[in-house]
Image: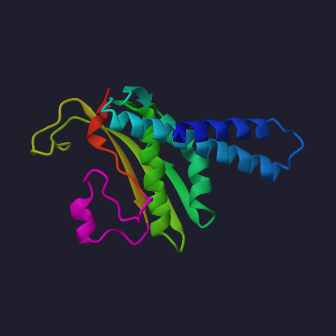
Amino acid sequence: MQHDILTSTLMRLGVLRENRQLPADVSSQILALDAKAKRSADLTKKLVSFGQRQFLRMEPMNLRESVARLQPEIVRLLGKGIELRLTGGASPVWVEADSSAIDQVIVSLCTNARDAMAQGGCLTVDVTRIDGSPAASAPDGGPRPGSVVRLSFEDKGSGMDSSVRQRLFEPFFTTMGVGGGWAWDWRQCTVS
């Protein structure tokens, strides 16, 4: 049912996109709606897959390229009062992950940062490869073999209280009301 609604919406948006007589601001809004509808369709597919216990589609992806590709959408999402900074360099950082899930994580974390900075501020998104060394230790305190990639988000918002920090990595935990937020298990991503 949801798939049929999204398919119909995407088809109608496609027809509107082809109309060259629309004002530029309307055309840009249609493009934004089209992108959101595609994300919704992808999320619906993921939820159906999750319900059917199917696996994520793991493939090599350049994490820096994914963040850079999402930059225009993130800037629109953040609004005029919040500056976005992308750091960590320009060289490719390859991981094996489900690109749709990673995109959803990035947008979700940026949305959370925006909500935490009601008065404006700066959001820094950093992608860094950390080579295995004693300084890069595993959760058990031992050294990590090879390299890991760190995707970090830093904002100047209100932060999390101790009760939120204790539940941060619980699947499906959210501080948002009914219908808001989602969770993803970051442990499913591997560095290549």
Magenta residues? 156-180
Left or right? Give the position of 163 relative to 56: left
**Residue 68, can we see it?**
no
Q: Position of residue 113 (x, y in %)?
A: 45, 61
Q: Residue drawn at (53%, 39%), measured in percent from left and top?
A: 1
Q: Is 144 placed above or below 126 here?
A: above
Left or right, 149 with reference to 118: left
What colour-coding does the image apply?
Answer: rainbow
Give the x, y percent position of residue 138: 15, 42
Q: Residue 137, how many percent across, how many down?
A: 16, 43
Given residues 2 and 169, the one toward you in this image is: 2
Residue located at (21% from left, 34% from top)? 132
Look at the image and say whether residue 73 sits in the magenta stretch: no
- Residue 157 included in the magenta stretch of the image: yes
Q: Residue at x 46, y 32 (%)?
A: 91
Q: Residue furthest front?
A: 1
User: Split into 4 quadrants, where in the image is the C terminus?
Assistant: top left
